Amino acid sequence: MVYHCCPAMIGPSVLDCDMACLADEGKRALAAGATYLHLDVMDGHFVPNISFGPYVIECLRKHIPDVFFDCHMMTSEPENWVEKVAKAQGSQPGLLCYTFHYEATEPRGKTQDVIDAIKANNMKVGLTISPDTPIDAILKYADQIDLALIMTVYPGKGGQSFIEPMMEKVKTLRAAYPNMDIEVDGGVKPKTVDMAAKAGANLIVSGSGVYKAEDMSGNITTMQRSVEKFGNGKEEEALTPLRSDKA
């Protein structure tokens, strides 16, 4: 097993929270040990569902100014939303990432344009691929991005299980870019996180594994410890202490 030094970070997907109380739900997960928030923007075109848009992210930022937001843009034309999402800058540089789908831009020859626009708007660049897209798609632009998201389910479809073969993509990317933030999203919970951690992912997105958990703090710290142990190679005594919401 090859270890890396990228920080272990757990990012709850707010799609699984009580959306009527979005700011409070974000704060609740952060208080339970989460490191960042994963915000899924769905436009009803790239994926069938509609979630929320840039204005909601901008409003959420007013309540949570100091935390990293990863904005996962499941949109057919991500170039249209760059400037609007950029309004949600945090209290310091580096707290906002605009993560878009290769499948939405590459067929139209827009991938490089979107990367350039994100950088021009002072956001981190995230690039993601769906399960059927080969890792070469990420590798083509890897020198220009800050975060690579490997989808471990098909975007926009609920109730799917973690697709373990996607870990080969993570391994390939980690071997080529030992210092890159590599994120996995879809079906990641305490029972599946070890596979992602061992492959080299350091950013763990979990929706139901956080917001539907009986013990939110327990699940978050369990996943954090997995990345620290299997990804960073830390010994037991150096791992984040295991927490629990239960008495």
Image: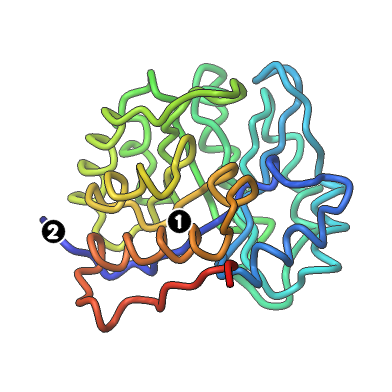
Q: Residue at x 55, y 56 (%)?
A: 11
User: Label 1 amino acid?
Assistant: Asp
Q: Earlier in the sequence, mark 2 or mark 1?
A: 2
Q: Residue at x 66, y 20 (%)?
A: 47
Label 2 SS? loop
Q: Residue at x 41, y 78 (%)?
A: 241
Taking depth in this image into account, of 99 and 209 the one nearest to the observer is 209
Taking depth in this image into account, of 80 and 185 the one nearest to the observer is 185
Which class describes the residues within 10 Å of circle 2: few (<14), some (14-19), or many (20+)?
some
x and y percent of residue 229 in the render? 25, 66
Position of residue 1 in the picture relative to residue 245 (left or right): left
Q: Quadrant of residue 124?
A: bottom right
Position of residue 233 in the picture relative to residue 215 (left or right): left
- Count the marks: 2
Q: Which residue is mark 2?
A: 2
Assign the C terminus to one quadrant of the image: bottom right
Label 1 SS? loop
Q: In the rendered image of this protein, does residue 165 appear above or below residue 10?
A: above
x and y percent of residue 76 in the render? 67, 23
Disc ID at residue 146 = 1
Farthest residue in the bottom direction? 237
